Image (cartoon, rainbow, N blue to C red):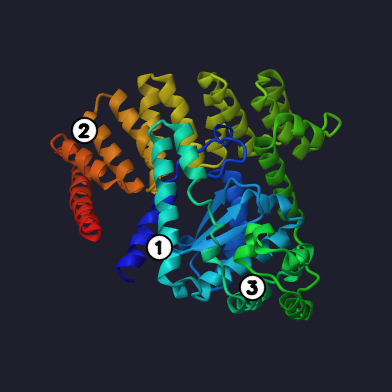
Amino acid sequence: MGRMSSNYKRLTAVLMSAILMIFAAIPAFGQSLIRDTEIEETLRAYTDPILRAANLQSSSVDLFLVNDPSLNAFVTRGQNIFVHTGLILEAETPNQLKGVLAHEAAHIASGHLARRDQSNRSAYGSMLIAAGLGLAAILAGEGQAGAAILAGSTQFGTLDVLAHSRINEASADQAAANYLEITGQSGLGLVQFFEKFRYQEVLSNARRYPYFRGHPLSSDRIDKLREVTSESQFANVEDTDEEAFALIMAKAKLIGFIDAPQTVFSKYPETDSSKPGRYARAVAYYRAADLKNAVKTIDSLIEEEPENPYFHELKGQILYESGKGADAIEPMTEAVRLKPEAALLEIALAQALIEGGTSPQIDQSIDLLKSALRKENTNGFAWYLLSQSYDRKGEPALARYAIAEQSFAMGNYQRARSFAQRAQEGLREHKAQSRRASDIIVISGAQLASNKNRRR
């Protein structure tokens, strides 16, 4: 890949700096990237078999969740798939969502992104730079400012310049149907999804959903796709009960966090004793500052399903963000015990332990954050918390090193080099960190010089 492509990879890494954005901290309908282990794993379960069918390494394709009510999904260079929350809420079945994901995977596998012209690349680069600044502001503690920058970063994925051609769209349709065939799944979900929005074809471009501005729809496309998918031996294969229920729970969780509490209570009234209903209401009670009912409702779910890590996670989040950090440690610990491979759960527990402040708690937070960073090495928020832990432990050199890593992950090379240089003198007994600090200094210096030359 050339210089321009490597720059996009670095810019994309800025977005991948996994800030632990708790849903409630995000302004309603404010566009930003959000993290949630449960929803991410649901999307992964739908997507990974499709990626393998497309001869793509699932570990090389990143999925991002965008907090936006509009119906949209799109791909970017660096093999990244972005999914709007609005798309998840609009999908009636997992198969419909899988169809869209398969279509996006086809754009990656077919190399459609590589054929975009220079003007498209420049527009996308500007968008990522603005988004990176927003994430940096949030990490620095300026949450509102960061959210404002993110919201203004040319509105993730709605750039008309990133639209696919009709030829590429038809090609991606056929490839998606093939991937679903290979995995033994029906392709009719994608047809149903397109049929549902067939009317978008006759709307002006400005009135279409973002997805159909970037993915132009036509009756001819739908008819050809239906012909292929209806002939498949797997045409009538339905989603499993587990897949369907995972989507229902994901929707309930999203609605609970995104919609106004009164809207949630209207959609899921007290008479709805289902798990999705209680899940959404637990979040809505918490957002309405009704801690008693929030805990009571989530406890009822935990009692029925004590091995569900996400119920314990939500209880911990509710307690922590309600100012009861000490009480949050127990449910967060249980969430990590039930799902030790989830980096975000480890980070959440570490944050609560740091607030506890005792020496054993600080030591445990360091272990948790190291474990999380082995899974997500570019998680800027984890590096930031690790710096806090080392600072409280009286290890200033390691704290500075962690800030250097955080800054490097964010693409802030000036700050990364500065903190790495300041850390080096005290890292003599920490050879691995000392070598890494040297690498950060050299790479950051080279990147800063390269950026300076490009500006000339």
User: Mark 1 or mark 3, which has the lower sequence index?
Assistant: 1
For the N terminus, the image quarter is bottom left
| Displayed quadrant of residue 98 | bottom right
Residue at (52, 76) in percent of width and height: 110
User: Mark 1 or mark 2, which has the lower sequence index?
Assistant: 1
Asked whether the viewer can see residue 316, the reply is yes
Question: Above or below — where is 107 with respect to 371?
Answer: below
Label 2 is placed on what type of residue?
Ala
Asked whether the viewer can see residue 20, the reply is no
Tally the numbered discs: 3
Secondary structure of the residue carrying numbered label 3:
helix
At label 3, counting other C-alpha atoms closer than 10 Å, the crowd grade (few under 14, some 14-19, many 20 or more) is: many
Percent position of residue 116, x then y: 46, 72
User: Mark 2 or mark 3, which has the lower sequence index?
Assistant: 3
Label 3 is placed on what type of residue?
Ala
Residue at (71, 77) in percent of width and height: 221
Report the mark closest to the observer, 1 or 3: 1
Q: CA distance from mark 1 to mark 3?
A: 29 Å
Report the mark closest to the observer, 1 or 2: 1
Percent position of residue 198, x then y: 77, 67
In the rendered structure, are the residues bearing label 2 and label 3 in contact, judged by CB atoms less than 8 Å apart? no
Q: CA distance from mark 1 to mark 2?
A: 39 Å
Residue at the outermost right position: 271
Name the foreground residue: 222 vs 108. 222
Percent position of residue 58, x then y: 51, 63
Which residue position is annotated with label 2?
397
Question: Above or below — where is 38 with respect to 232?
Answer: above
Label 1 is placed on what type of residue?
Ser
Q: CA distance from mark 2 to mark 3?
A: 50 Å
Which residue position is annotated with label 3?
176
